[in-house]
Structure formats: structure tokens, C-alpha cells
Image (cartoon, rainbow, N blue to C red):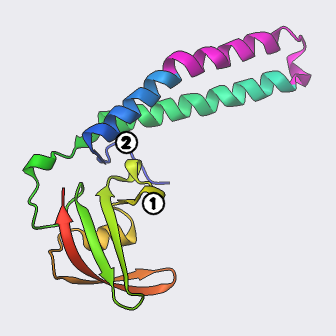
Amino acid sequence: MENNTNKEFFFTKEGLEKIEEELEYLKSVARAEVAAKIKVALGYGDLSENAEYDHAKNEQAKLEEKIAKLENMIRNAVIIEEEKLDKDVIHVGSKVTVYEKESDDEDEYTIVGSAEADPLEGKISNESPIGNALLGKKVGDIVSIEVPDGIINYEVRAISI
């Protein structure tokens, strides 16, 4: 298993705020909810055959693991300062328009850190095959990317922030 304790996590300012809000919710609301479930389950008596208690304790363990993960991400967060990015080169934080000649398709992606990735929103991770291949490229560059379906050839058409 990969050790992520010192791994940097790239965020836009909004993305980090979203993670901080989620952490605050988990610590204040979700912890209290799980504690209440455990208290109720304890009232059922014999813990050796108490499925509600086991379920609540498992839920608590998962919650604490998620809290620790988010705290680590925040501790190792690197904010993408968009105003300092070179707009001629693709970086984490860049919005990129690419053209695939084979399918005559034009797509727009925003390159984000893995914690913010949401492919349905067009936000792809800098660690994904496409995101990683696009990093450092300029308008006019042709990028060949190996994906599960084969190889995609993209032409970089535009870069913005």
C-alpha cells in the first residue's frame, strides 16, 4: 500500500474549502450521530450478539479513517495560485481544449489534483493518464496517450485558467 502521509495534494482555493467544509461536518455532525448510535446500541445489552453495536462501531471506524485522510490532505495541501501560472503551458489548474482527429471530437478538461477530480464535470486528475500526458504541453502540441481502449492522439487547441 502506498504511503500518502507526505504526498502533496493539489487544490484550487475552492476545492480546498470544500474539503475543509466536509471535514468540519464529519467532525461536528457525523461524529455525534455515530456516538448516538453506539449509545443506543449499548442499551440493547449483550454486546456479543449485538449487530447494531457492531455496525455502529464499524461506521465509527470508517468515519475516523475518513477524518484522518482529510486532515492529511489538508496538512499536505498545495494551493494552485492561478494568477502565477504560465498561461502558455498546461499546469495543474489549467483549462485545456483538446481535439481528437480520429473521432473529430473536441473536449475541454480542467487539470486538477487527484482529490478534486470529477470526470463528469470535466475535471481530470494530474495523475490520470490524460492529465499527466497533457502537463507541460503547449497549444499546437500533439499528445499520444495510452488509455485502456488504445491510444488517443490529442492536439492541444487552447489553454486558459
Residue 127 spot, x, y in % from top left = 35, 62
Judge from the rendering whether residue 145 lies leftward or rightward of residue 50; answer left or right. left
Judge from the rendering whether residue 143 lies leftward or rightward of residue 59; answer left or right. left
> Is the residue 35 above or below the residue 49 in the image?
above
Residue 71 spot, x, y in % from top left = 40, 31
Residue 135 spot, x, y in % from top left = 23, 68
For the residues carrying marks 1 and 2, which lies nearer the camera in this image?
A: 1
> Is the residue 100 above or below the residue 26 in the image?
below
Residue numbers of the magenta segment: 27-50
List the residue tagged with mark 1: 119
List the residue tagged with mark 2: 5
Which of the pair 6/117 is nearer the observer?
117
Residue at 79%, 27% (x, y): give it.
54
The kind of secondary structure the magenta stretch mainly shows is helix
Q: Tag count in the figure? A: 2
Residue 151 spot, x, y in % from top left = 41, 87
The answer to which quarter of the image holds residue 136 is bottom left
Regarding mark 1 in the picture, which secondary structure is present there? helix
